[in-house]
Image (cartoon, rainbow, N blue to C red):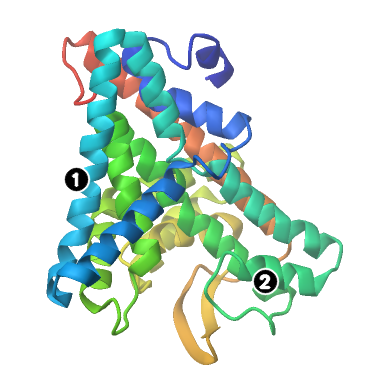
């Protein structure tokens, strides 16, 4: 389906199918919104205020409620805004939902981050490639050779297809902008404090677990979408399905192994292995089989897989919402 056709109709086939679809086209075809009004930036600022209040007024154990507060607050504020705009005119409310949902999707930023590493590799500027990779991963990158830089980039792009694209669209499909923003609040807080350390022992654990739950269904859906994308791109779709079934659950994350193993199988490469974090060596289970050496073009193929799988999900969203609407039902956001 040509998403440009949808965009010429205000980003939708109608009000009901348009809310999840319009933002995906806008985010893939246009530049990302300025960083000073991007939704994740404001959610991060809100999380910082919540953390400050928890540190000042609550015991460490009580900070586990901050994820619930941020999630619920994001949902309530967004719902209230859309409701008020709906009283003015339904079209204004629909347009606001498209814009709000668009701020939760980061397809262009994810592609750009990967392609920046790719460009440095093609120019054989190894230090610049390592620095660019270091901006998007937590591992030490100063010692990595080209295949390891490629591996780190492919892993990061594959893993983030879930929380940058599929999860926001999934929750937008179910609950419109309020639920998409609530998801983004959970994901933002997890990226800020979802670590195992003394400072964020309780809050980090709660944030990470809530993020795991929120991404559980989208991660598995992403694996299916990547298999479909591999089939469309004439890659190894059967290998992708086989690697998901064999390797996805070996990953230390309950969700990240699904997109990573699907990409590994589709490209015929092996992800995972030895990483170094702040000087400490760590081993992550292998995903896929190394049928050939990794190369810079694998980054491009992963980005293409990302957009094909995202497009497949948008089409699925359209059919689901149209089916529900034609059957006389409604989704939560409609």
Q: Quadrant of residue 79?
A: top left
Residue 331 picture location, percent across and down: 21, 23
Q: From the viewer's perspective, is residue 147 above or below residue 214?
A: below
Judging by the rendered image, the residue that carries numbered circle 2 is: 149
Helix, strand or loop at label 1? It is helix
Which of the two residues, 209 or 289, is positioned nearer the viewer here? 209
Left or right of 119 in this view: 56:
left
Q: Is residue 196 visible?
A: yes
Quarter of the figure with the C terminus: top left
| Residue at 58 percent of width and 39 percent of height | 34
Judging by the rendered image, the residue that carries numbered circle 1 is: 72
Helix, strand or loop at label 2? It is helix
| Residue at 40 percent of width and 33 percent of height | 101
Q: Earlier in the sequence, mark 1 or mark 2?
A: 1
Residue 50 picture location, percent across and down: 26, 59
How packed mark 1 is, by other alpha carbons closer than 10 Å (few <14, some 14-19, many 20 or more), is some
């Amino acid at each position: 389906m040509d998403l440009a056709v949808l965009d010429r109709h205000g980003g939708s086939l109608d009000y009901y199918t348009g809310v999840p679809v319009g933002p995906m086209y806008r985010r893939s075809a246009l530049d990302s919104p300025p960083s000073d009004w991007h939704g994740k930036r404001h959610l991060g600022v809100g999380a910082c205020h919540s953390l400050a209040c928890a540190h000042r007024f609550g015991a460490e154990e009580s900070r586990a409620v901050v994820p619930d507060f941020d999630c619920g607050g994001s949902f309530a504020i967004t719902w209230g805004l859309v409701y008020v705009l709906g009283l003015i005119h339904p079209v204004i409310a629909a347009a606001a939902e498209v814009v709000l949902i668009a701020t939760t999707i980061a397809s262009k930023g994810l592609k750009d981050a990967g392609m920046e590493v790719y460009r440095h590799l093609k120019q054989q500027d190894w230090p610049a490639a390592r620095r660019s990779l270091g901006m998007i991963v937590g591992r030490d990158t100063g010692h990595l050779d080209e295949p390891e830089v490629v591996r780190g980039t492919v892993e990061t792009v594959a893993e983030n297809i879930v929380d940058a694209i599929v999860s926001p669209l999934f929750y937008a499909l179910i609950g419109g902008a309020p639920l998409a923003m609530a998801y983004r609040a959970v994901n933002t807080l997890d990226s800020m404090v979802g670590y195992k350390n003394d400072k964020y022992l309780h809050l980090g654990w709660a944030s990470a677990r809530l993020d795991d739950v929120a991404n559980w269904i989208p991660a598995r859906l992403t694996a299916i979408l990547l298999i479909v994308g591999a089939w469309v791109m004439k890659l190894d779709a059967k290998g992708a399905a086989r690697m998901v079934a064999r390797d996805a659950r070996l990953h230390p994350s309950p969700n990240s192994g699904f997109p990573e193993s699907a990409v590994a199988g589709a490209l015929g490469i092996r992800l995972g292995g030895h990483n170094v974090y702040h000087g400490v060596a760590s081993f992550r289970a292998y995903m896929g089989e190394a049928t050939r050496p990794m190369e810079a073009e694998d980054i491009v193929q992963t980005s293409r897989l990302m957009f094909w799988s995202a497009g497949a999900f948008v089409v699925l969203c359209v059919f689901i919402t149209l089916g529900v609407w034609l059957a006389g039902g409604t989704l939560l956001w409609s």
